[in-house]
Image (cartoon, rainbow, N blue to C red):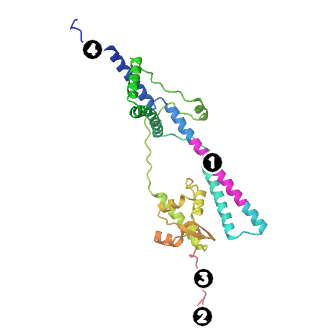
Amino acid sequence: MSTDQPIGPWPVIVRTKAGAFHMAFALAHWAGAHTVSEEELHRRIVKARAEAHTEKVDEHSREARRAHRKATKLRRIAAEDGGLVPAAQAELDQAEREARRHENMLAGLGDFEISRVDPGQITHRRRRIAAVRVALLAAPVAGVAVGSWLIDGMVLIVSAVGGVAACCARGDQPFERTIRPVPAELLADTATLVLDAVEDDGPEPELVIVDTGKWKAELRLYVEQAVAAAQQAGQNGVHCVDLLQGLQQKGEFFGLTSKEFPSKLRDAGIPTKVVSVAGAKAMGVTYDELSTALGHMPRLPLHLVQDLTQTVPIPHSPGSAA
């Protein structure tokens, strides 16, 4: 036997190592969700937004119809009985407010419009898919470990031999790194989506949202004027649902419900408590506690302030000169 030729590894070992490398590379490509294109992820995000918008519209439409039916029933009872007791009248007022609130929410939602998708959302969705796929890959490994522990060690040996045989059979034949086509049903559901085919020359500046606290000052001013006007009308406070309804009529705070709005008021430094207004008790803002929080009495809006600048003629005495 000649000693001039180097002794290398066996061909079977080389083939098995190459097959193991290619299989590991293919599994990593699949587990990392790189088989899903950015277009598919983009379309899935837009589809999820459209479904969430439709769900909100259906919910507010359903609640608005329910409130209208309740209000209509109470008005019919009032017409038949010649009026309502205070508790029923409060229910009627609450139903009318709820109906107006849901109608305002529907007007604010409008028709669904496709907005720009942030690249970070696409990356986040890809990571979610990758997490699920990694869990699927880990399940067989965990099953082999549990089976070897509870049943017999031959489970591990058979699994290892099967894996080595698969790697050896694959050999030096790399897998093609493919990206699956966008499903036809997803294309049909997002047919109106037009993706940008040409990227911009330079990256767009990242938008950073900074909370300047301006909304808190504007909210405090609105509540201050509303409570001051209510005090002038003989009421010691205003219900939170009435404050929210007024704001939504101005096109603000559409994303909040009557249950969430009191916490928003407290975030702005406005105290809330259960207030009795016109015989109905609900969460609201009182004149006295708001005065303490503001450090001064709530001020009326300018159009409600009485004008005291007009001059009043002083009558002349009989002995004075003309």
**Residue at the location (57% across, 35% down)?**
193
Name the mark nearer the viewer: 2 or 4.
4
- Residue at the bottom extreme, as displayed: 319
The x and y percentages for residue 232 are: 59, 73
Q: Is residue 305 visible?
A: no
Q: Amino acid at mark 1?
A: Val
Sequence order check: which comes first, mark 2 or mark 3? 3
Q: CA distance from mark 1 to mark 4?
A: 71 Å
Classified by dominant secondary structure, the portion drawn in magenta counts as: helix
Residue 56 falls inside the magenta stretch: yes
Q: Nearer the viewer, mark 2 or mark 3?
A: 3
Report how far apart the C-alphas of labels 1 and 2 lie in the structure.
Answer: 79 Å
Counting from the top left corner in percent of width and height, residue 43 is at: 54, 35
Q: Secondary structure at mark 3?
A: loop
Instruction: Between label 1 and label 4, give the one nearer the viewer.
Output: 4
Give the residue displayed 41% in from the left and 17% down from the top.
169
Q: Earlier in the sequence, mark 4 or mark 3?
A: 4
Q: Secondary structure at mark 2?
A: loop
Label 3 environment density (alpha carbons within 10 Å; few <14, some 14–19, many ≥20): few
Q: Hey, which quadrant is residue 146 in on the image?
A: top left
Residue sitting at the far top: 1
Separation of marks 2 and 4 at Cα, in angstroms: 136 Å
Which residue type does callout 4 highlight? Answer: Gly
Numbered label attached to residue 319? 2
- Tell me the residue that label 4 is attached to: 8
Residue 47 on image: x %, y %? 57, 38
Give the mark nearest the N terminus, 1 or 3: 1
Q: Nearer the viewer, residue 316 or 170?
A: 170
